[in-house]
Structure formats: C-alpha cells, structure tokens
Image (cartoon, rainbow, N blue to C red):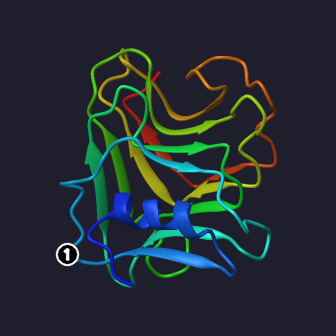
Amino acid sequence: PNFVNLTAANTDLGNRGVSGPVIFELQSNYSSTGETFPIAINTFSGASSTNTLTIKPGSGVTSTISGSSSVAIIKLNGADYVTIDGSNNGTTTKNLNITNTNSGTSSAVVWLASTASDGATNNTVKNSTLTGNASTTTLGGIVSSGSTIGAVAEVANSANTYQNNTISLSY
C-alpha cells in the first residue's frame, strides 16, 4: 500500500514482517514533515538475504529526509538485510539526501546499533548524501556501535557495506 511517510511504513513492517523483498520507494511528493525521528527499523520477522528491505527514491526522483534527532535520522536497531540506496535509477547517482540538523554532540545521520542480543548485520548504505549539523557537533554520518551511540557494540554489527556516500558536517 501507499503510506503517508516512512514512519508509518516502518510501523507496518514491524507489525507484519516480510515474506519477500520489500521496497520503500520515496515518491516526488514525499516530505519528511510528520516523520518521527529517529526512524528506528528494528529486527523484523522474515528478514533474510532474499527477504530484504530497501529504502530508495522513486525513478527520476530526488528525495530529502531531514529533521532533528538527538540520536539519528535513521537507526537500524539490530535490523538485518536493510539497504538504503540513494540512486533513483539503479546506478551510482546520489538522489537521496539525509540530514540531521540536531546540534547535540552525540548524534548521527544513520546509526547501525546492536541490541543486547542482536547486531545489525548485512546492511548497506550507498549512493547517498549524508549531512550532519556541524563538524563540531554531529558524531558521524554513519555510526556503527552499541545500544548507546558511540559505545562498543554488545553484539557485533558485521557484514555491513558503506559505499559511494558523500558525508559532510560530522566529525
């Protein structure tokens, strides 16, 4: 179905799980107004190398997910097999901008977090422009850590790929 925003789509994903590959495709009328940040994608039932979740802009669309969060704009909270692909045409174009405007010193744009019993594994963040608030405030464009941002992972976050991203205004 069509959802009003990623928060609503993610809630449905958490309630239903997956039985095949799922794509959250941002359309030309997408606005991050109304999103609840962080958009925390938790472990979801059915996730596998075949049953993946992909977040990407629609064909020919350039999308922006922007807001303020003291932790992250998108948090993969022990989630596996999630791809954030900023290309709107299957190449290496960068058509997805994700920005965290929070001025706190322990936030990220995208955070891969382990839980006490589950690491975030087999995830990909690619072809995206990730922007923090400032190089003196935003901890990282992409942070992979434990259940507290920047802390040692309780369970390893492994087999994750970060490819062809532009990261700015973070330290």
Q: Secondary structure at mark 1?
A: loop
Question: Which three-letter amino acid code belongs to the residue tagged 1?
Answer: Asn
Give the residue furthest to the front. Answer: 15
Position of residue 74 measured from the top left corner of the image (x, y, whole percent):
45, 46
Q: How many other residues sit within 10 Å of disc 1, few (<14), some (14-19) or many (≥20)? A: few
In the image shown, does 51 or 102 lie closer to the viewer?
51
Position of residue 4 measured from the top left corner of the image (x, y, whole percent):
26, 70
Q: Is residue 151 above or below residue 164?
A: above
Image quadrant holding the N terminus, namely bottom left
Q: Residue at x 48, y 71 (%)?
A: 87
Q: Is residue 108 left or right of residue 163?
A: left
Q: Residue at x 69, y 79 (%)?
A: 19
Q: Residue at x 41, y 67 (%)?
A: 9
Q: Is residue 40 left or right of residue 65?
A: right
Q: How many tags in the picture? A: 1
Q: Is residue 87 above or below residue 99?
A: below
Give the quadrant of residue 17.
bottom right
In the image shown, does 77 or 162 lie closer to the viewer?
77
Q: Residue at x 29, y 58 (%)?
A: 64
Q: Which residue is mark 1?
A: 29
Position of residue 135 measured from the top left corner of the image (x, y, whole percent):
38, 21
